């Protein structure tokens, strides 16, 4: 039987997982929220379905009957997890041990004042987004236990990759170096997210949670400075966090300060990170940018 993955939400990370499995011969289906995006997915060989926040969608319910694996990247909202709200019953009816992966966030751990967290630590989210994620994780694991489904959670650190990274921030003129003493963030390249999810599909473990991050939690201002160095540009001046003019959303990212341990993805799933730190990841992305520029016949960054 051909294996089929259904993705609730085909964003930056899930899309890469889907494309890699499609290249291996899997059938891929997934949701989007617009007809335009659905047409784009269809052109890529992905069976599209338009998700509704208001009610279950009949063609999604029908499509789920033939899947072997499910990946959820849609975030929870104020009313809880949108997928469980409308399709929990459809998922509960899947065969025993069906693989279900939930893309969560390291925000579930909250602030640890720079200390290291593992998957064994208590979940103590700082803000409402983190609390929603904790509730959603619990709901997914509860669904798995009640109905014999193989649910795994992937707690993702700050995601970067092609078109979404510090190099692009610098090139666009949006880069800032806001300094909060002792503050570090964990990160993960999207390719390492994909390889971790694929490793879990091949080595399922019901009820497991995995921290998905690289080996080097680092201050955000250092990442911007390194990106500037690669581009041959002067870094922007440092700004004190206490006096920096930040939006509420931007300021909220500085509420949590922790280092995230990734030993479990290595020991249990055999993951060997392609980009063990932000320097390796940004250097590879910079090489990709140069290759595109040279291919276009220009040397202008």
Image: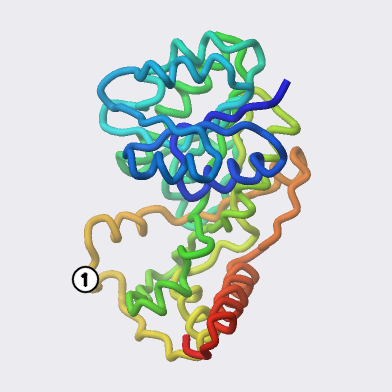
**Rendered residue at 46%/67% (across/down):** 182
Few, some or many C-alpha atoms within 10 Å of disc 1 (few <14, some 14-19, many ≥20)?
A: few
**Quarter holding the N terminus?**
top right
**Rendered residue at 74%/40% (across/down):** 269
> What color scheme is it?
rainbow
- Where is residue 284 shown, x and y percent of the image? 63, 71
- Where is residue 30 shown, x and y percent of the image? 48, 33
Left of 168 or right of it: where is 186?
A: right
Report the front residue among 16 and 224.
Answer: 16
**Picture quadrant of residue 54:** top left
**81 is higher (above) or lower (below) than 144:** below
**Picture quadrant of residue 9:** top left
- Where is residue 236 shown, x and y percent of the image? 37, 85
- Where is residue 291 shown, x and y percent of the image? 61, 78
**Rendered residue at 49%/44% (across/down):** 43
- Exactly how many numbered labels are in the figure? 1
Report the front residue among 48 and 219.
Answer: 48
**133 is higher (above) or lower (below) than 89:** below
Q: Secondary structure at mark 1?
A: loop
Left of 59 or right of it: where is 20?
A: right
**Rendered residue at 35%/86% (across/down):** 237
Residue ID for mark 1: 245
């Amino acid at each position: 039987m051909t294996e089929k993955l259904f993705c609730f939400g085909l964003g930056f990370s899930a899309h890469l997982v889907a494309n890699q499995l499609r290249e291996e011969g899997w059938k891929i289906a997934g949701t989007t929220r617009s007809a335009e995006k659905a047409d784009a997915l269809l052109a890529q060989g992905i069976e599209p379905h338009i998700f509704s926040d208001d009610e279950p969608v009949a063609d999604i319910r029908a499509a789920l009957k033939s899947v072997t694996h499910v990946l959820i990247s849609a975030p929870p909202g104020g009313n809880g997890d949108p997928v469980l709200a409308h399709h929990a019953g459809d998922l509960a009816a899947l065969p025993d041990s069906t693989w279900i992966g939930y893309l969560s966030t390291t925000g579930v751990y909250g602030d640890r004042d720079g200390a290291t967290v593992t998957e064994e630590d208590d979940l103590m989210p700082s803000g409402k987004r983190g609390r929603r994620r904790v509730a959603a994780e619990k709901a997914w694991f509860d669904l798995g236990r009640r109905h014999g489904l193989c649910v795994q959670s992937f707690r993702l650190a700050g995601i970067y990759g092609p078109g979404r990274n510090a190099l692009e921030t610098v090139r666009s003129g949006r880069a800032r170096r806001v300094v909060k003493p002792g503050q570090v963030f964990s990160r993960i390249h999207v390719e390492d997210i994909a390889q971790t999810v694929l490793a879990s599909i091949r080595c399922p473990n019901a009820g497991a949670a995995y921290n998905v991050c690289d080996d080097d939690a680092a201050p955000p201002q250092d990442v911007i400075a390194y990106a500037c160095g690669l581009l041959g540009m002067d870094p922007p001046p440092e700004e004190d966090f206490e006096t920096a003019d930040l939006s509420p959303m931007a300021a909220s990212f500085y509420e949590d300060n922790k280092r995230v341990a990734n030993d479990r993805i290595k020991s249990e799933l055999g993951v060997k990170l392609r980009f063990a730190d932000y320097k390796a990841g940004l250097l590879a992305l910079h090489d990709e940018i140069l290759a595109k520029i040279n291919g276009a016949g220009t040397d202008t960054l």
